[in-house]
Amino acid sequence: MADSIFLAIHDLRTVWHPCTQMQDHEELPPIAIRRGQGVWLEDYGGKRYLDAISSWWVNLFGHANPRINGAITEQLGRIEHVILAGFTHEPVVKLSERLSALAPPGLGHCFYASDGSSAVEIALKMSFHYWRNRGETRPHFISLANSYHGETLGALSVGDVALYKQTYEPLLLKNIVVPSPDAYLREPGEGEADYARRAFAHMEEALARHAHEVCAVIAEPLVQCAGSMRMYDPVYLSLLRAACDQHDVLLIADEIAVGFGRTGTLFACGQAGIRPDFLLLGKGLTGGYLPLSVCLTTDKVYEAFYGEYQSLKAFLHSHSYTGNPLACAAANATLDIFRDDDVLTRNRALAAYMGNAAARLADHPHVAEVRQKGMILAIEMVKDKQARGPYPWQERRGRRVYRHALERGALLRPLGDVIYFMPPYVISTDEIDFLVEVAEEGIAQATRD
């Protein structure tokens, strides 16, 4: 019978883990998980871990959710997969109609992929191809400093987190980067909205100078998740939509991580009252069960590709599992839960409780800020609180918190020295209290010397 040690030994012989320096596992072997239930993961020794990061931000309604389990099981008895070129099936049609109805009005066309990076690639290619079909060559994109959009080459090109990007710089597209509206950078006493308006001057200048060669602006609405969970005010999105309209540039909203209720509304764009030209969704789309992402776009974009096959107007992008029926069934079950359970109302209450419970951590001498957007809360550890000076990367204080949390039975995987909570929506207030307690202990230990 398999156990944690047996699996860890065999794992390290053959499995290359993502976003991992494999040598680290000489000191801290991978934890073999046997089962999950609700917000909890359980290893082969029976130890439980509260999944505070939703298994990389995907699990919305808990592990082994009976409704999503049932939907996948039922679909298995019908069709597990069929090519989506020239064929279709009920789950993908149903899902597409529902997403189009839930998204900001006018996003009526769904192009499917399997993961967030692939959805970004679709939007980049589609926006470039759109202008080509209109007789224009626009080879550039504008994105925000500290942004992250995935790790394929196109997605890395429009990202700005050096940890992921710098090695591959010679392979990447040339991109225009403007300063972020990240509210952490505002002056003391300056409001988030005021700083967002001030920061927008950089975007306005870039659009005025480069609009003729830019096919699209891409942004993560409200939260730059992999960029240390930095957050900004919705007014920036309102200004961005108006400027893109003025300069005739397309707008891509990457809601892979922040969609489906994470920021307090179903889609983060809703807080600014805007409609992007491309809305990218993934992660929580299937409740964390199966790989599926989607790029939603408008009639205007769709019609620019409509014509004879031989004209090269067609969008010739694909992968074998596009619109997989099992994944679509899981996504439909996820949308059913949103429809039936008043999830957003409950999330607002949970988010308020989480913010109040964690507020005391801001008083720690090595915590610069506790910030929150909906069901995302981040705690920024620093070496110098007054100057907000970070710890040297080599010291890895966040790693110490991570290890303490594992010992206590919580999965708190940091982003550098930023500890964050991004839990499943089925978490209880008692479980939130436990996470805050574990984080408080871990930060105290990590910053002791």
Image (tube, helix red, strand yellow):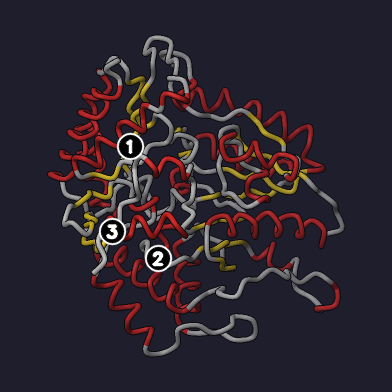
Q: CA distance from mark 1 to mark 3?
A: 26 Å
Residue 57 is situated, as x and y percent measured from the top left of the image, at 38, 51
Question: Which numbered mark, 2 or 3, is in the foreground of this view?
Answer: 3
In the figure, 161 relative to 124: above or below? above
Q: Nearer the viewer, residue 384 or 1?
A: 1
**Which residue is labeled 2 in the image?**
286
Give the Cα distance between marks 2 and 1: 22 Å
| Residue closest to the eye, 359 or 408 | 408
Q: Relative to 287, does residue 443 appear above or below in the rendering?
A: above
Mark 1 burial class by Cα count in 10 Å: few <14, some 14-19, many 20+: many
- Looking at marks 1 and 3 on the same chain, the residue that comes earlier in the sequence is marked by 3
- Reading the image, the residue beneath label 1 is 377
| Residue in view at x 58 percent, y 40 percent | 164
Rendered image quadrant of residue 160: top right
Frontmost of labels 1 and 3 is: 3
| Numbered disc 1: secondary structure | strand
Could you tell me the amino acid type at mark 3? Answer: Ile
Amino acid under disc 2: Thr
Task: State yes or no: discs 1 and 3 in contact (Cβ < 8 Å).
Answer: no
**Rendering coords of residue 442 (x, y %):** 25, 30
Q: Position of residue 190 (x, y in %)?
A: 44, 17
Secondary element under disc 3, as helix, strand or loop, is: strand
Q: Residue at x 59, y 86 (%)?
A: 87
Decide: is 365 above or below 133.
above
Do the CB atoms of the residues marked 2 and 3 lie less than 8 Å apart?
no
Tell me the amino acid under the disc marked 1.
Answer: Leu
Position of 297 with respect to 430 (left or right) is: right
Query: Which disc is residue 33 wearing?
Result: 3
Viewer-proximal residue among 112 and 342: 112
Quarter of the rendering containing residue 326: bottom left
